[in-house]
Amino acid sequence: MSKLTVTVPDIGGAENVEIIEINVAVGDSVNADQDLLVLETDKATMEIPCPQAGKILSLLVKVGDKVSEGSAILELESADSALSADADQNRAGAAPAAKEPAPSADIKAAEPEPVAGEERLIDLVVPDLGGASEVTVIELCAQPGDSLNADDSLIVLESDKASMDIPSPQAGTLKELLINVGDKVKEGQVYGRLLTQARVDSAAPAQQALAQQTAVQAASDKALEQASEPTVTAVSAAAVSETTNRMEKPDIHNVYAGPSSRRLARQLGVDLTRVNGTGDRGRITKDDIRDYVKTLVKQAENGVATVTSGSGIPAVPAVDFAQFGEIELQPMSKIKKVTAANMSRNWLNVPHVTQFDEADITDLDAFRASMKAEAEKQGVKLTPLPFLIKAAASALRLEPSFNVSLHHDGEHMVQKHYVHIGIACDTPNGLMVPVLRDADKKGIYQIAREASELIEKARNGKLKPNEMQGGCFTISSLGAMGGTGFTPIVNAPEVAIMGVSKAQIKPQWNGKEFVPRNMLPLAVSYDHRAINGADCGRFFTTLVALLSDVRRLVL
Ligand code: CAO
């Protein structure tokens, strides 16, 4: 075993090149030629391979640091005792020096001296590739007819180990491209033509030369990656295959993207591991990043929960419904958008279980009918709802395991000593959930009165924010509309919700005979992180018993 310091190899003369990824950590065992880190110049990314197998003892750089040839990167305990530290360093730095750029090879401008404003058609030529015989075209960044600024990316080339943007040498209009994605190109090959205008200040030649230099620098940057040529292919292939399997290993260094895409992602703050690459072999293109950002913006504008970010679930693809028949686009109300976002959030975050039961409300309904006239005199409409609210509040008191929320620290439960009941309310603008406070302490008339006021406010858009907050448990009643049952979605951070369907007279066995009873179908959905099935069994039995024997409600 020997300890050696791994340094940046010959990077074709580039200075102060930024480290954009470090792919290893202290303690990692690495193989010879395994990628250690990724450097990025303006126009190219390059992976720096490990000179030999060993164990990382210390990292001497971090992401964002600028390095040049010879900069110490890390200390390695070499597994190969035969090699001395010096020898290892030499190997690390043994990349062939990048070839000096040959500017004249890059752009073959028309021969005559330019006249200011005169249009000229120039050939776009593959620059010096630093010794690589052939490279693959992996992206076309512009299309014929596009107006380009000098330095706008035209094409992206890729060798085994590096990708490089080839920029436009001048501003102009792209007249034609003579290559396609997947083509192999060689240095000096004409790959397109650009219509330019000679500039009045005759700076064009200088600018051309500058653009060429940039392009050639990219190519010569690439040359340094050829340092470990024989093993590079295998490493690169592995990286690509890992990238296509990104769901399992979403590390930034496994992402398959070129320098311009990486730069764009950094500018936009996009995590490339979340972007779906549509390029060759799953390569992430700039358009993929733009599409990703567009989708996120659209989702945010529509109030749709970013289900792709939190859960890793792919978004439902956009469909052009007009192809199937006549359609019209109707704007969603603010409340509908918020509801959509909340429903997605709750559905995806809360592991739901729904339990069903029926309450015999024959006696409750008879009592309600007998009290209706008196209630009306008091200005109260007595539907089943106030009884349901009262029963739920009493059940929460009797079974406090239901009156909880999960604490956001993931370490605690919040046990509530108040009982506020949410009422899911269908309004012209969408679903709203006003909250009736301290329902356990109030009588049926008071609950009925307050519930009607809250429902009316909800329907008139008059609810104040504090009248929609602080609920412990929600009742969602579709009883007036019909249906035999449904599974409501928990209104987090509450941990349970009750869905009420339409009561119906059904035959019930009383031990001797079937008798007609008014049965109310109920469903309780609960957050299984906070509540166990047995808790729900107890809560539900209590609730059903309270509804079945209305006298218990006053106890
Ligand atoms: N079974 C049979 N009849 C019922 C019933 C039930 N479960 N619930 C209510 N009814 C009856 C009422 O008694 C009333 O009849 P009467 O006038 O003869 O007494 C009639 O249906 C209409 O009731 P209502 O709708 O005026 O009042 P409510 O108190 O039952 O409901 C409210 C109020 C706000 C809960 C309800 O109007 C509503 O908006 N529900 C929608 C909830 C919702 O959209 N939930 C989301 C579903 S997904 O979670």
Image (cartoon, grey):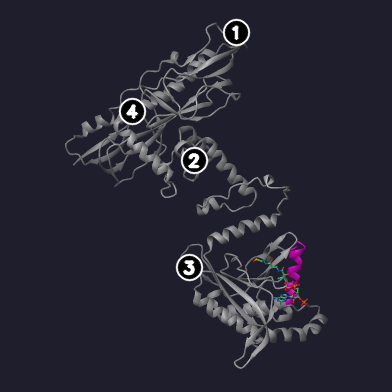
**Label pair 4/2, CB-CB below 8 angstroms:** no
Q: Secondary structure under badge 1?
A: loop
Q: Secondary structure under badge 4?
A: helix
Q: Which residue is mark 1?
A: 115
Question: How far separated are the C-alphas under marks 1 and 2?
Answer: 44 Å
**Label pair 3/2, CB-CB below 8 angstroms:** no
Q: Which residue is mark 4?
A: 226
Q: Which residue is mark 2?
A: 277
Residue at 75 percent across and 72 percent down: it is: 452
Whichever of callouts 3 and 2 sits on the residue coming sooner in the sequence is: 2
Q: Nearer the viewer, mark 3 or mark 2?
A: 2
Instruction: State left or right for residue 402 relative to residue 502.
Output: left
Residue type, numbered disc 3: His
- How many numbered discs, if any? 4
In this view, which residue lies farthest toward the left?
Answer: 82
In this view, which residue lies farthest toward the right?
Answer: 377
Whichever of callouts 4 and 2 sits on the residue coming sooner in the sequence is: 4
Q: Which residue is mark 3?
A: 412
Disc 2, ligand 1: is the CB inside 8 Å?
Answer: no
Q: Secondary structure under badge 3?
A: loop
Instruction: Bin the neighbour count of mark 3 within 10 Å (Cα to Cα): few under 14, some 14-19, many 20 and up.
Output: few
